[in-house]
Image (cartoon, grey):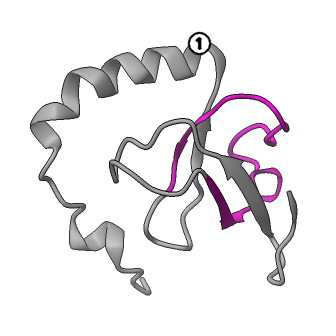
Amino acid sequence: MRDAPEEGRLLVTFDVKEWIKPASGADRIELDMVDPAVAQAQEPWREGVPVLLSVPLRRDLEASALSGEQLKSRRKVLDHYLPPATNTQCPEYWRTPQDR
């Protein structure tokens, strides 16, 4: 994890164990993300802690990283609801930033 060129963002490298949606991707990815410590919406990430990472398509939204019991609980929900949602696309609102 290191500072991104833009203030309030981090460049974070993740080793990916499993892709959920999309169903596949690289084994290691680097993402330019909102710094959770700046947003103060969740605990800062710690190296080596397994997380279930949900990354919004919109760059201005913070990613959600669940670990521990939250990860286990959310994974059960995903396992239940993901099969019927396989062909579902995110609504345009979440894909396109809008000035409001």
Front in this rendered view, residue 96 or 55: 55
In the displayed structure, 31 sits above or below 53; it is: below
Q: Position of residue 15 (x, y in %)?
A: 67, 45
Q: Position of residue 26 (x, y in %)?
A: 53, 57
Label 1 residue SS? helix
Q: Is residue 12 visible?
A: yes
In the displayed structure, 83 sits above or below 71; it is: below
Q: Quadrant of residue 28?
A: bottom right
Residue that appears at 81% across and 42% down = 44
Residue that appears at 22% across and 34% down = 82
Residue 30 drawn in magenta: yes
What residue does disc 1 label? 69
Q: Residue furthest right?
A: 2
Left/right of residue 81 with respect to residue 11 in the rendered view: left
Q: Is residue 39 visible?
A: no
Front in this rendered view, residue 26 or 33: 26
**Quadrant occupied by the C terminus:** bottom left
In the displayed structure, 98 sits above or below 75; it is: below
Residue that appears at 58% across and 53% down = 63
Q: Position of residue 55 (x, y in %)?
A: 51, 55
Q: Quadrant of residue 11?
A: bottom right
Residue 34 drawn in magenta: yes
Q: How many marks?
A: 1
In the displayed structure, 23 sits above or below 32; it is: above
Front in this rendered view, residue 21 or 81: 21
Q: Which residues are magenta?
A: 28-55
Residue that appears at 82% across and 51% down = 37
Q: Position of residue 24 (x, y in %)?
A: 39, 51
Three-letter amino acid code at the position of disc 1: Glu
**Quadrant occupied by the N terminus:** bottom right
